[in-house]
Image (tube, rainbow, N blue to C red):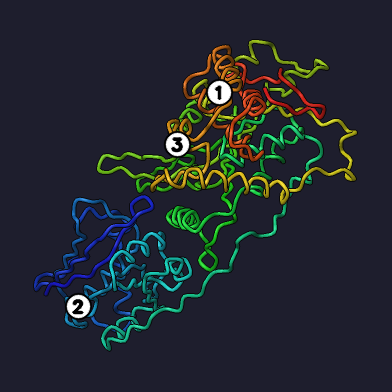
Amino acid sequence: MLAAVRSAAVLGIDAYDVTVEVDAALGLPQWTIVGLAAGAVKESRERVHSAIVNAGFTLPPRRVTVNLAPADTPKSGSAFDLPIALALLMATGQLARSAADGLTVVGELGLDGSIRPIRGALPLARHAARTPGETLVLPPANITEASLVTTVRLAALPELGPLVRALRDQLLPAAETPRPPNRARVADSVDFADVAGQAGAKRALEVAAAGGHNVLLIGPPGAGKTMLARRLPTILPVLSETETLDVIAVHSVAGVLASDDPLPPPRPFRSPHHTVSAAGLLGGGSAPRPGEVSLAHHGVLFLDELLEFPRSLLDALRQPLEDGRVVIARARRSVTFPARFTLIAATNPCPCGQAGDPRGACRCTPAVVARYQSRLSGPLADRIDVHVAVGAVPLRSLDPAAPGDSSATMRGRVDAARGIQHKRYDAMRSGHGITCNAHAPGRWLQAETPVAPRARELLVAAAERLALSARGYHRVLKVARTIADLEGDDMVGVPAVAEALRYRPAECGAVTLAGRRGADGAGAI
C-alpha cells in the first residue's frame, strides 16, 4: 500500500515542500530510502522502527521504500522522522491515508516515541503559512519559535502515540502558543557613559549607527577600542518586526536559539576570534549552515585585532559587505544566507601597537609596520566608511564626575536620523529592504541628497586629491548625508562633507595614527 505525507525542508533561511512517500509491499523485509537523502535521513530507519514499536504499534514484515520528493534535491537533517513514521503507519493500514490531509509534518523521533525539536522551525512556519488552512505539526519544543508567525495553525503533541490517536479520532488539538516576552529594549548592561574621553570616537560611532556605516578603530592597546565597539548595539534602533523574524530565522537554521525564549537581543552582536575558519565566518559545510556574518544579520559584526585575521579571510568579506548576502555554492545546489551587518573592526597600527606614538615607543621597523598594515587590502578598506584613530586617553580624562553622553541620549539622536532615512527611502525601496544611507544605491542617493554648491566643490576636489574610487566618492557622500540627518538638515553642507572626508584614510589600505586628533587623543585619519 502506498501512502504520502506532506513535509518541508529548509534551504538557506527559506523552506520548500517535500512529499514523503512510503510503499510497504510484500516481499523480503528491508528498507530503502531514496531522494538524495543524507546520512541523518538514512539513519531514520532505526529511529522510526523503534519509535513505532515502543509507541504501541506493530510493524509487519514488509519491503519498505521511502521516497523524498522532489528526488533531485538533497535532503538532510532529522526532521523527516515523524512524517516517515506517519506515512508508514498509513501504508500498513494502521492509520487512514486521509488522516494527514491539510497537514505539514516535521519532527525528530526518539527511540521511545518522543517527538524531539528540530532546526528551522520559523522558516517552516513561514512556509506553511503560505498555504491557507494548512496546519503545521511540529515538536512542542519548537512551538514558541513557530508561534512568531501568527497566520499559521500549529499542532504539537509530545509523543508519537498520542499524535496517531488524535489523527485517528480527527481531533488534532491546536497547540497553545504562548507569546515570548516583549523585549522592545532590554536594560543595557553597558553604556557609552562608561567610556571616559574619546569624544571623537564616540561621535564617529554615532554617525555609523545613524547611517549603518562600517567602522575601523585604530589605536594602541588599552585605548578603549573594544570598549567602544561593544557599546555600539546600545545606540542602534530596535529591530522591526520583519527584521526580528529574519534574525530569528537565521539563528534557528544555525541551531543557536533557546527553545523557550527565541527572541534575540535588540541587535545581534557577533565577535569571532581571529582563528575562525572560512566556513565559520562565512558559512558552509556539507549541509551549508550560516556563518558569523549571517548570524550578525541586522546587527554588528565585531572583528577585534583585524590585522591578525588571514588576508584571504578578510578579502572574502568584500562580497557580503557589498551585497548584504553570502552565496555558498555546492556541486548540486547553491544556498544564499542574508548578511546585512554593520562591520566594526579594531586593530593596532603595528605589531607592538605603538606606531604613531609621539613618545617614540614603537620598536617596529618601517618594513615590519608596512608588512603588517598591508594585510588590510585597499578594496576592503574602501568599503569601510569611517576610519577613526583612537589615541590613548590621558589620565586626567578619567574623571567619573564628568561622564559623557549616555547610550540613551545618543540613541535618541540615532533614532531621529533613522526616522528621516526611513521616510526618504520608503517610497523608493519597493521591497529592497533599504532602511539607511549606507545601503542605498548611488542613484537613490543622488536623487535624494541635495548638496550645497560649495560642499560639492569641496567633495570633488578632495576626491581627486585622495584618488577616491567612484565607490569611495559615494561612500563619503553617504556619510555626509548621515551627518546632515543627525543635524536635521535637508541639504548637505560644507561642515557635513568636511567631517565625512576626515573619516577617510589618506590612502585606502593605509593604517596609521598620523591624522587629525582631538584633545582627548581620538580623531579621524
Residue drawn 90% across the image and 45% down it: 401
Pointer 3 or 2: first along the chain? 2
Pointer 3 or 1: first along the chain? 3
Label number found at residue 90: 2
The type of residue carrying mark 1 is Leu
User: Which quadrant, please, contains the C terminus?
Assistant: top right
Position of 467 with respect to 89 (left or right) is right
Label number found at residue 108: none
Distance of label 3 from label 1 (alpha carbons):
16 Å
Residue 339 in the image: above or below residue 79: above
Residue 180 in the image: above or below residue 163: above
Mark 3 against mark 1, which lies toward the viewer?
A: 3
Q: Please name the residue that numbered disc 3 is placed on.
A: 320
Nearer to us in this view, 133 or 221: 133
Please provide percent x and percent y for residue 316: 45, 31
Q: Please name the residue that numbered disc 1 is placed on.
A: 376
SS state under label 3:
helix
Please provide percent x and percent y for residue 134: 29, 72
Position of 136 with respect to 455 (left or right) is left
- Most extreme residue toward the front is 453
- Most extreme residue toward the left is 26
SS state under label 1:
loop
Pointer 2 or 1: first along the chain? 2
